[in-house]
Amino acid sequence: MMKRVAILGATGLVGQRFIQLLYKHPWFEIAVLQSSGKSAGKTYGESVKWVIDTDIPVEISQLPVEPLNAESIVKEGIDIVFSALPSEIATDVEKELARRGLIVISNASPMRMEPDIPLINPEVNADHIEVLEIQRKKRGWSGAIVKVPNCTTSIFTLSLKPLYDDFGVKRVVVSSMQAISGAGLTGLPSMFIMDNLIPYIEGEEEKVEEESTKIFGSLGSDGILHNNNLLVSASCHRVMVLEGHTIAVFAELEKKNAAIEDIVRAMEEFKGNKIKGLNLPTQPEKPIIVRRELDRPQPRLDRYEGRGMSVVVGRIRHDKVFNGVKYIVLGSNTIRGAAGNGVLIAELLVRKGLV
Ligand SMILES: NC(=O)c1ccc[n+]([C@@H]2O[C@H](COP(=O)([O-])OP(=O)(O)OC[C@H]3O[C@@H](n4cnc5c(N)ncnc54)[C@H](OP(=O)(O)O)[C@@H]3O)[C@@H](O)[C@H]2O)c1
């Protein structure tokens, strides 16, 4: 049976991606759209500043946009809520919905570090979903909250997974070149970014460093335990690219002198271990695509590989500082790093019988 879904923050950039990915989805039907009060009384088509390169589906453009309101979601008999709300306002409504029995899949950063809140990048740590049992017991919720990792973290950890599994990873340095769309629809005025690079994104480096060790952590009796054997250092930068975060990764491996061909093979053959065989509609056939040309990946050419769900890795080579490996990875921040990851998590929950 189709699951009825609501999108919070539906008029924003991630909200628009949710609409693109959920329209005509084989398992989900978009039933409720909510955003700030400024769209009250208007249809979606009248209130959204659409920036995605496929048209707004006509049926969706005619749906009303409600102001944020948990009550109406409960009344509508929604099964899954996708939240693309700004961090400052997400927590109260997400908790209220989980308390009242809804499954909330959220892109907002608050609560990502709480041990009983799963932070899921499905191919990397789908098994962390088991922490929901602890969450429900501890908080007395009949619903649940699952968080989507930060966009850079999602792209980076997916690329690191086969190295982690096959060679062991001790220390990693990550330097990101992040797209403008990562700051939201109106987050970054052109005056600041045109002909420019901004070497600071508030809170981003801490998110990449802390979220990664949670994603590569393990399930303990009170929740997810961070992996303290993995050290991550990040430097994050905004560049004048519309979509697609590019990340330079330098890793020290436990297995010394690993051959580059073996590393390339591990990445190319990676099947997304944790969701292998589940046949989820949004699951990319190849989570990691390796390019051998010296000038790839590039955002304009590679960001929508695997319908935006694959990451593209290139320039895999020896790193002499760590006596390890270095490479470049690129992924769509609004799809792999946000809405697409959220939809994949929802599909995982359906397959596991949790919705
Ligand atoms: N952009 C990315 O690549 C990305 C990646 C990962 C995670 N995220 C996270 O995803 C969330 C959404 O990001 P975004 O880029 O889509 O932001 P955005 O483009 O600025 O969209 C924000 C959305 O929230 C709504 N909103 C604003 N204030 C509200 C309020 N008081 N009550 C209810 N709704 C309100 C807006 O509605 P109106 O149109 O009515 O103002 C809009 O729909 C954020 O938490 C962000 O950190 C974003």
Image: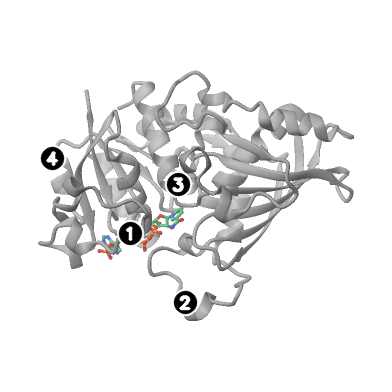
Determine whether label 3 and label 4 are within 8 Å by CB. Answer: no
The amino acid pointed to by label 1 is Gly
Circle 3 crowding by C-alpha within 10 Å: few under 14, some 14–19, many from 20? many
Q: Which residue is mark 1?
A: 12
Q: Tag 3 or tag 2, which sits nearer the N-term? A: 2
Q: Classify 10 Å Cα crowding around label 2: few (below 14), some (14-19), many (20 and above).
A: few
Residue 226 visible to an observer of this rendering: no
User: Would the CB of label 4 be found within 8 Å of ligand 1?
Assistant: no
Give percent across and percent down for residue 89: 32, 60
Q: Nearer the viewer, mark 1 or mark 4?
A: 1
Q: CA distance from mark 1 to mark 2?
A: 18 Å
Q: Residue 99 appears at what percent x and percent y? A: 26, 40
Instruction: Write down the quadrant of residue 226 in the picture.
Output: top right
N-terminal-most mark, 2 or 4: 4
Q: Amino acid at mark 2?
A: Ser
Residue pointed to by mark 2? 190
CB under 8 Å between discs 2 and 4: no
Does 225 sit left or right of 72 as displayed? right
Q: Amino acid at mark 4?
A: Glu
Q: Looking at the image, is 8 positioned above or below residue 310?
A: below
- To which residue does mark 4 refer? 76
The x, y position of residue 273, in whole percent, is 58, 24
- Closer to the chain start, of discs 1 and 2, is 1
Give the residue pinned by disc 3.
335
Work out whether residue 4 can be spotted.
Answer: yes
Q: Residue at x 56, y 34 (%)?
A: 287
Q: In 3D space, how far apart are the residues under numbered discs 1 and 4 (Cα atoms)? A: 22 Å
The mark that comes first in sequence, 3 or 1, is 1
